[in-house]
Amino acid sequence: MTDSTSAHPPRDRPDATEAPQKRLSASSPTSSPELADLKVRLHRSLRQYPDFPTPGILFEDILPIFSDPLLHKSLVRALELQVTDSYGHGQLPDIVVGLDARGFLFGPSLALRLGAGFVPVRKPGKLPGATESAAFTKEYGEGSFQIQSDAIKPGQRVLIVDDIIATGGSAAAAGLLVKKLGGTLLGFIFILELDFLKGRDKLDAPVHTLLSSQEEGSKT
């Protein structure tokens, strides 16, 4: 995802312990406390930069998570718990799709933990061979994504991952590409959600986020 999608108006830091949308009764007693603790730990690691990239914008930086091996491990574990709690061990994805570019930071690691393959969705001109394309509108203009035409087999269960959901346009385009190839879209998972932009309203599959961010009422 582009840097612009992690920028938002400032406000006090919100609670980071959003509960998963669906849980398995068998895993809840053990995974719920662990997941809640991981969410708090990850949220505390985020950095904020006022007036970046433009005046009046507060930029949310997730990169400290990846500079610390323990935090990085905590992130992958939290994502794994979120997925297994939400879908169950019998409905785990066959493919994890990561969005260009920050979905590549943790998508492959999550795929390994889930026993799934990893497929990148990239900006135009970055993938060899036959591709499918989908356009989308982002905060400051238009964009498009491509996926290799043979990357997903018909009927494979697919989970889409990215760092932040903002307006939801890029994630929606990735979902369209999955469907074009005949995949079954299980849902989307993000590290952070900019709630006030209401990006999840554009997505037609379940949306799961580890951390919450600003709401509309906080805009300046």
Image (tube, rainbow, N blue to C red):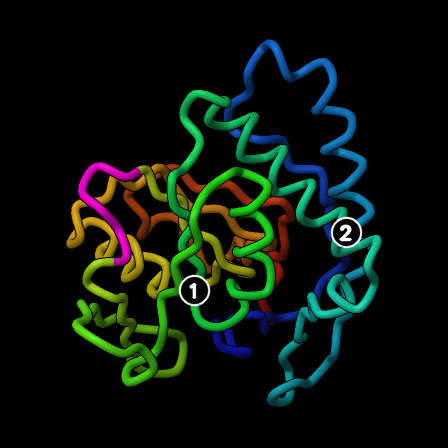
Q: Amino acid at mark 1?
A: Leu
Quadrant in which residue 118 is drawn: bottom left
Q: Which residue is mark 2?
A: 42
Label 2 CA crowd tier, 10 Å (few <14, some 14–19, many 20+)? many
Provide residue 182's location: percent of width, then percent of height.
Answer: 17, 46
Question: Of residues 181 and 207, which is closer to you in this image?
Answer: 181
N-terminal label among 1 and 2: 2
> What stretch of residues is rendered in magenta?
151-156
Q: Which residue is mark 1?
A: 99
Quadrant in which residue 131 is drawn: bottom left
Question: Who's the residue at 57% across and 48% down the image?
Answer: 110
Query: Is the magenta region chiefly helix, strand or loop?
Result: loop
Contact flag, marks 1 and 2 (Cβ < 8 Å): no
Provide residue 83's location: percent of width, then percent of height.
Answer: 53, 34
Above or below: residue 62 compared with residue 193: below
Where is the C terminus found, in terms of image quarters?
bottom right
Callout 1: SS: strand
Question: Who's the residue at 69% across and 85% down the image?
Answer: 51
Provide residue 93's location: percent of width, then percent of height.
Answer: 41, 37
Q: Amino acid at mark 2?
A: Leu
